[in-house]
Image (tube, helix red, strand yellow):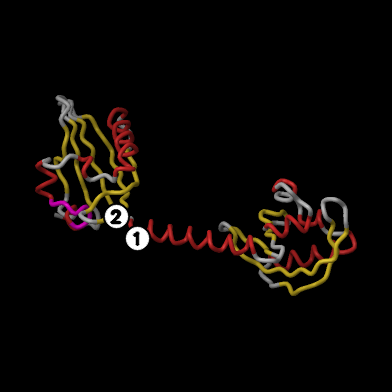
Amino acid sequence: HMLDNLPAVVFEYSVFPDGSRDFTYISPRCEEILGVSQDVLMRGILPMKNFIYHEDWTDFFESTERSLADLHEWKWEGRLNRRDQVIWVQASGMPMRMPDGVVVCHGIITDVTQRKQLEQRHRESDKRYRELVEHIPLAIAIHSNGHLVYANRNAFEMMGATKPEEIIGKSALDFVHPDSRNVVRERMKLAMQGFEVPALEEKDIRLDGKVIDVETSAYPLSYRGTPRSAG
């Protein structure tokens, strides 16, 4: 059977007029992905709650009931108990009411554990990187099309800012002294075009109006998927 060879669990789940419900078909791949045999699932020996990770049960139950009641597409991502481990799955299905009153949901379940683990590693890596940037003894800022989208703690202190809105969203040139503005504007363009800009002394203006001498450099980067410049 072609469905039996798919790298996912294909299922048919039926809700009968008397309120009973169970799998009326599930592909053999369930043993590999869910850790339970096709025979056990088809005979309804184990209640659904046994498979769903306890913290995700409420979300699973409520999303399923809404879908079955309204007959709209069901989508769910959560954790399952598989033997001695917890896995992540992505599930979807489309319920339909048959002429005899039975609501039948055809759907598919895929194992997304590796993707979720990769996402978690990326989040942890981003968190470590952000903590490093926040505590490094240098003022670091990121701008996109000339507007500041990020500044670390030292950048806030250097410019005399106490709140993000005093800097974030503003034009980077607002903090550059008129004597340095033309040079800085050209350097920002080069960085946005993909060139690394070497260190150069310039004059900046703090929020309190004080003029300060700083040395800046800039390089291109991708920030949240968009070309930006950091300096």
| Nearer the observer, 100 or 158 | 158
Classed neighbour count for the residue bearing mark 2: other residues with Cα under 10 Å, few (<14), some (14–19), many (≥20): many
Q: What span is colored magenta in the figure? A: 32-37
Amino acid of disc 2: Asp
Label of residue 114 in the image: 1
Q: Residue at x 25, y 50 (%)?
A: 81
Give the x, y percent position of residue 215: 79, 69
Picture disc at residue 34: none
> Percent position (x, y) of residue 167?
74, 50
Residue 96 versus residue 114 in the image, above or below = above
- Give the secondary structure at mark 2: strand
Label 1 SS: helix
Q: How far across and down, in percent of the image, does residue 137 sit?
A: 69, 66
The secondary structure making up most of the magenta span is: loop
* Residue 230 visible at all: yes
Q: Is residue 3 visible?
A: no
Q: Is 126 positioned to the left or the right of 147 in the image?
A: left
From the viewer's perspective, tell me whether residue 138 is left or right of residue 8: right
For the C terminus, which image quadrant? Answer: bottom right
Q: Indicate the amino acid at tag 1.
A: Gln
- Residue linked to disc 2: 111
- Give the class, few, some or many, for how many residues have Cα within 10 Å of label 1's Cα (few <14, many ≥20): few
Q: Residue at x 19, y 39 (%)?
A: 13
- Please determine whether, in this image, residue 103 is positioned above or below residue 111: above
- Image quadrant where one finds the N terminus: bottom left
Q: How many marks?
A: 2
